[in-house]
Image (cartoon, rainbow, N blue to C red):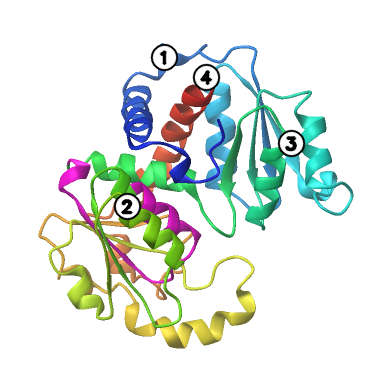
Amino acid sequence: MNFLSVADLTPDALAEVLRLAAEVKAAPERYSNALAGRSIGLFFAKQSLRTWVSCDVAAIQLGAHPLSIRDDTAGLGTRETPADVARVLDRYLDLLALRVHRHEDLVEIAAHADMPIVNLLSDREHPCQALADLQTVAEHRPLAEATITFVGDGNNVCHSLILGAVMAGARMRLVGPPGYEPDPAVVALAREHGEVTLFEDPYEAVAGSDVVYTDVWASMGQEAEAELRRRHFEPYRVTLELFERANPDAIFMHCLPAHRGEEVVDEVIDHPRSVVFDQAENRLHSFKALLLHLL
């Protein structure tokens, strides 16, 4: 099977991956040779720190061989079509994970490969991030009891979190400036699994939340819009005052990298209840669990 979207998993399969992620984190030595002899391709058309390092280390710690492939070498869609890249790499690898600009490229590659294809980030979703996010929330409270509020841009990170959260039984709240809402099709799909509520007022949205989550206002490729977006998103900055509207034991989350002083202030991202670096660590454990599930 492929993992282009969180929705490629059933709720039961998602629960199993999260259970396995917790187990792998608690006892990594039990899985040190689980994927011995397997070759994992890691394709990067965009900059990466957490994704590249966590995936590389995850493969090695499972006994597999990771191979990093840079797009300036492969030339996806320029030097070769996505279909031909898929047909070639399918002869060498057991699994191919890609961080790309266009989600359509992932779909085309998956259509021409027999091995599992994993979305490490596209313009539509960031499903591996959502796995780490849900693992992190579950370390603090049962997912079925959690209310998660995403403050900011309805982007790829938001899309995957919406889907994963409701599939895991959590309640999802979304708030951001008009015109930057998540894709209505993603919201509609998520509502088939659970509760998704859109708000206009960030203080109303955050009140009573167990998790407050935000992301950058301008993602990679949106640099030309940065100043316009800054004006639109200014009222949605996660300040200490906003964070304190959440429940007293609420946690703060951010997928990183953060633009400190823009979408979140230092007092929140460095708060004792900020778990952003636990999230980053869990990219390692959740990717191990996904590899084990797929292979």
Quarter assignment of residue 98: top right
- Outermost residue to the right: 79
Residue 265 locus on image (x, y percent): 33, 71
Q: As shown in the figure, which amino acid type bears the numbered disc 3?
A: His
From mark 1 to mark 4, how far is it between C-alphas? 9 Å
Disc 4 marks which residue?
Answer: 62
Comparing 11 with 78, the one in front is: 11
Disc 1 marks which residue?
Answer: 29
Image: 46 above or below 294? below
Badge 3 or badge 1: first in the primary sequence: 1
Q: In the image, which residues are magenta?
A: 142-164
* Residue occupying the point 65% across, 12% down: 37
Image: 116 above or below 152? above
* Residue occupying the point 56% across, 15% down: 35
Image: 287 above or below 181? above
Badge 2 or badge 1: first in the primary sequence: 1
* Residue occupying the point 61% across, 19% down: 64
From mark 3 to mark 2, how far is it between C-alphas? 30 Å
Let me know if residue 241 appears in the view. no
How many residues crowd mark 2 within 10 Å: few (<14), some (14–19), many (20+)?
A: few
Proximity of marks 3 and 1: CB atoms separated by less than 8 Å: no
How many residues crowd mark 3 within 10 Å: few (<14), some (14–19), many (20+)?
A: some
From mark 2 to mark 1, how far is it between C-alphas? 38 Å
* Residue 148 belongs to magenta span: yes
Residue 63 locus on image (x, y percent): 57, 16
